[in-house]
Image (cartoon, rainbow, N blue to C red):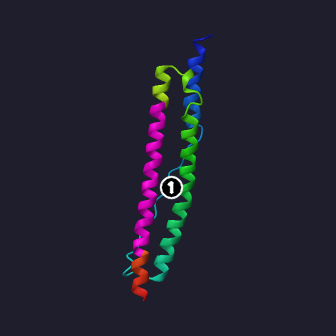
């Protein structure tokens, strides 16, 4: 019976973390140059960035749930191998989460830079 406990736990950890597939959002198309863009191009770009932001936040929430699911509630009950597997899984999920945050900030920064250039051109 004791042999089933680690096996069941390992299977549970593996399935819980993959129970929800997080869909990585499609990045916005090219952000127009604020110095030459039309109002319509800037509005379309804003809408695309807003869509991306919303979808990325849903992705980040999903990744957070996966990280929580992969984090053992009581690591003291895990074997050394199970702890290592859990830690590795949490590390990979955290790296994916953090990379997505970095990309989201990068897209927002690029759009804001072009928006400032567009607004400066309008004055």
- Horizontally, is 6 left or right of 112 in the view? right
Magenta stretch, residue numbers = 87-114
> Which of 77/5 is in front?
77
Could you tell me residue 49's position as x and y percent?
Answer: 50, 66
The residue drawn where x is 50% and y is 30% is 86
Could you tell me residue 20's position as x and y percent?
Answer: 59, 41
SS assignment at label 1:
loop
Could you tell me residue 97's position as x and y percent?
Answer: 48, 47
Eyeballing the image, is 69 above or below 122? above
Evaluate whether residue 30 shows in this view.
no
Evaluate whether residue 102 shows in this view.
yes
Residue at mark 1: 25
Q: Quadrant of the C terminus?
A: bottom left
The residue drawn where x is 54% and y is 22% is 78
Mark 1 Cα shell of 10 Å, populated few (<14), some (14-19), many (≥20): some
Q: Residue at the right extreme? A: 1
Q: Residue at the front extreme? A: 76
Eyeballing the image, is 85 above or below 95? above
């Amino acid at each position: 019976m004791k042999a089933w406990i680690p096996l069941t736990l390992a299977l549970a950890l593996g399935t819980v973390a993959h129970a929800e597939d997080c869909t990585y959002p499609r990045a916005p198309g090219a952000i127009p140059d604020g110095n030459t863009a039309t109002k319509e191009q800037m509005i379309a770009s804003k809408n695309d960035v807003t869509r991306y932001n919303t979808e990325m936040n849903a992705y980040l929430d999903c990744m957070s749930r996966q990280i929580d699911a992969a984090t053992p509630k009581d690591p003291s009950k895990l074997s050394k191998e199970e702890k290592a597997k859990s830690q590795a899984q949490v590390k990979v999920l955290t790296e994916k989460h953090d990379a997505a945050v970095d990309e989201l900030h990068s897209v927002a920064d690029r759009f804001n830079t072009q928006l400032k250039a567009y607004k400066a051109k309008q004055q």
